[in-house]
Image (cartoon, rainbow, N blue to C red):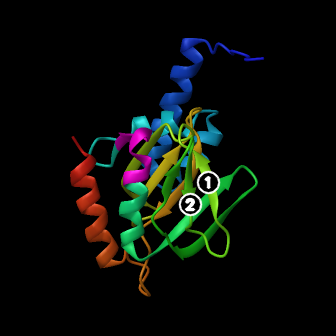
C-alpha cells in the first residue's frame, strides 16, 4: 500500500526557509539539516546555490561510479539518524547485469544495487565548519542518501589535491 502524505505548502515553505538559514551558517552537514527540518536530503541540496551543487540523473549511476573508481582510495560514507559509517576504500568498476548494477568495491564484500534505486547523483562543493568539503552524493527515489563518496583529506586535513582535481573534472562534465 502506498501512503501519500500531504504537507501544507506553508509548513513546507517554513521548513525550507529554516533549512536555508541553517545552510548559511555552515556548521551542519546536509543530512543533519534535512533531519532537523523534516525534509528529504534532495530538498536541502536543491537549496544550495549552483556554485556549490550540481546534479546528474541516476541513469548515469554506472558511468559516475566507474569514474570514481579511477580516483584511488576514497572515503565511502553512509549515515542515518542513529549515526554514520565511513571507510576508506578503493572503488572498483561495476558491472550491469539484468536489473542490477554489481558493485565489487567494498572489499571483502561485494554487492549489487537495483539500477532503478539511484534517482540522482549530486556533486557538492561547500564549506563545512570552515573547511572545504567535496562529495558525490547518490540519492534514492525518496530523495535520501544511498551513500556518499567524499574527497579524501590529506594529513593537514585539506582536500587531497589529486582527488580535488578529479572532482573538478567531474564537476565540469556534469554541470550543464
- In this view, the residue in front, 139 or 59, is 59
* Label 2 – label 1 distance at C-alpha: 5 Å
- In this view, the residue in front, 78 or 7, is 78
Instruction: Estimate the x, y position of residue 92 in percent, counting from the top left.
Output: 48, 69
Placement of 21 over or under 28, stated as above or below: above
* Left or right side of 46 for 13: right
56 in the magenta segment: yes
Which residue is situated farthest in the front direction here? 98
Instruction: Estimate the x, y position of residue 98 in percent, counting from the top left.
Output: 56, 43
Q: Which mark is residue 112?
A: 1
Placement of 164 over or under 16, stated as above or below: below
Q: Residues within 10 Å of mark 2 (few under 14, many from 20)?
A: many
- Chain-order first, disc 2 or disc 1: 2
Tell me if I can see residue 72 in this picture.
Answer: yes
* Labelled pair 2, 1 in contact (Cβ < 8 Å): yes
Instruction: Estimate the x, y position of residue 56 in percent, counting from the top left.
Output: 36, 41
Q: Which mark is residue 103?
A: 2
Placement of 68 over or under 18, stated as above or below: below
Give the residue displayed 35% in from the left and 62% down from the top: 67
Secondary structure, magenta segment, majority class: helix
Q: Secondary structure at mark 2?
A: strand
Tell me if I can see residue 133 in this picture.
Answer: no
Give the residue displayed 47% in from the left and 51% down from the top: 137
Give the residue displayed 43% in from the left and 77% down from the top: 153
Question: Magenta region: which residues?
Answer: 55-63
Q: Secondary structure at mark 1?
A: strand
Amino acid at each position: 500500500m502506498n501512503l501519500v502524505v500531504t504537507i501544507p505548502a506553508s509548513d513546507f515553505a517554513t521548513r525550507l526557509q529554516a533549512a536555508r538559514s541553517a545552510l548559511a551558517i555552515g556548521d551542519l552537514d546536509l543530512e543533519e539539516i534535512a533531519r532537523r527540518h523534516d525534509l528529504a536530503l534532495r530538498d536541502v541540496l536543491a537549496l544550495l546555490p549552483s556554485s556549490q551543487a550540481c546534479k546528474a540523473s541516476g541513469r548515469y549511476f554506472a558511468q559516475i561510479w566507474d569514474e570514481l573508481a579511477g580516483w584511488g582510495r576514497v572515503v565511502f560514507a553512509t549515515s542515518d539518524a542513529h549515526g554514520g559509517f565511513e571507510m576508506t576504500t578503493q572503488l572498483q568498476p561495476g558491472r550491469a547485469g539484468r536489473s542490477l548494477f554489481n558493485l565489487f568495491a567494498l572489499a571483502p564484500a561485494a554487492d549489487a544495487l537495483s539500477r532503478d534505486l539511484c534517482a540522482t547523483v549530486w556533486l557538492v562543493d561547500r564549506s563545512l565548519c570552515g573547511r572545504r568539503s567535496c562529495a558525490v552524493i547518490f540519492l534514492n527515489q525518496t530523495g535520501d542518501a544511498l551513500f556518499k563518496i567524499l574527497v579524501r583529506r590529506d594529513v593537514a586535513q585539506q582536500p587531497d589535491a589529486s582527488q580535488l582535481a578529479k572532482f573538478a573534472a567531474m564537476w565540469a562534465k556534469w554541470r550543464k
